[in-house]
Image (cartoon, grey):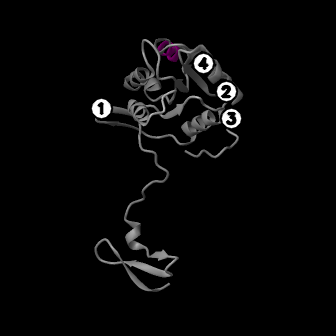
Amino acid sequence: MAVVQKNYKLTNLKILVVDDNDSMRFMIRTALHALGVEMVHDVGSASAAFAAIESFRPDIVITDWEMAPTDGIVLVKTLRADADPRKKFIPIIMLTGYGEEARVHEARDAGVNEYMVKPFTAKGLFNRLVSLIVSQRHFIRLNGYFGPDRRRRETRYLGGNRRLRAPLVLPLANSVMTPIKGSGFAPTAGA
């Protein structure tokens, strides 16, 4: 994920931080303040997060995975299943110590928008926040899943198979390949 560093003002964002570790909440809150986020509320459990979402109404939730008695995955799934659109569509960053691919997939399949592994940097956090703002993904409902589209797209498909219509120029061979019947290309005279 490459986010172009621009002068984004994060001043008006309201961010809820959910982590059962006081020191980690302090570090995340400090990083967010350094990035210009003025409205940060933090809680130490998923159950406290549900109440804070009602009263604080955050724009973004940053949550840890491993918390007791309710973990971050249950928090994410509960928010995605809620009838209230303010909860259902809230952008969520999972900030956790788990970096295994299976965990990333599980968090993605629960409905997180972004995934970060601790230890984190302020720059990495900034990039995830900007990504949530600039590269918003559509929400989908499919086979029991509701959340942001799990596929990341750089460009949109505009229809038609353009590869079969346009000649393929091979710079090393200095030749042009033109479409032929079927799915292949055939060489033609030099370019």
Q: Earlier in the sequence, mark 3 or mark 2?
A: 3
Which kind of residue does numbered mark 2 sit on?
Ala
Residue 52: within the magenta?
A: yes
Q: Earlier in the sequence, mark 1 or mark 2?
A: 2
Mark carried by residue 144: 1
Residue 31: mark in rendering: 2
Spatial distance from mark 4 to mark 1, Cα to Cα?
A: 32 Å
Measured as percent of width and height from the top left, residue 155 is found at 48, 53
The numbered dot on residue 25 is 4
What kind of element bears circle 1?
loop
Which element is circle 3 on? loop
Circle 3 Cα neighbour tier, 10 Å, few/some/many (<14 / 14–19 / ≥20): few
Q: Return the x and y of residue 55 as percentages of the image width and height.
A: 54, 14
In the image, is 32 to the left or to the right of 165?
right
The residue carrying pointer 4 sits among few (fewer than 14), some (14 to 19) or many (20 or more) residues within 10 Å by Cα, namely: many
Q: Nearer the viewer, mark 4 or mark 1?
A: 4
How far is disc 3 from disc 2 in space, using C-alphas?
Answer: 14 Å
In the displayed structure, 76 sits above or below 156; it is above
Query: Which quarter of the figure has residue 8?
Result: top right
Q: Nearer the viewer, mark 3 or mark 2?
A: 2
Front-most of residues 48 and 184? 184
State how far apart marks 3 and 4 are (Cα): 22 Å
The residue positioned 51% from the left and 22% from the top of the image is 64
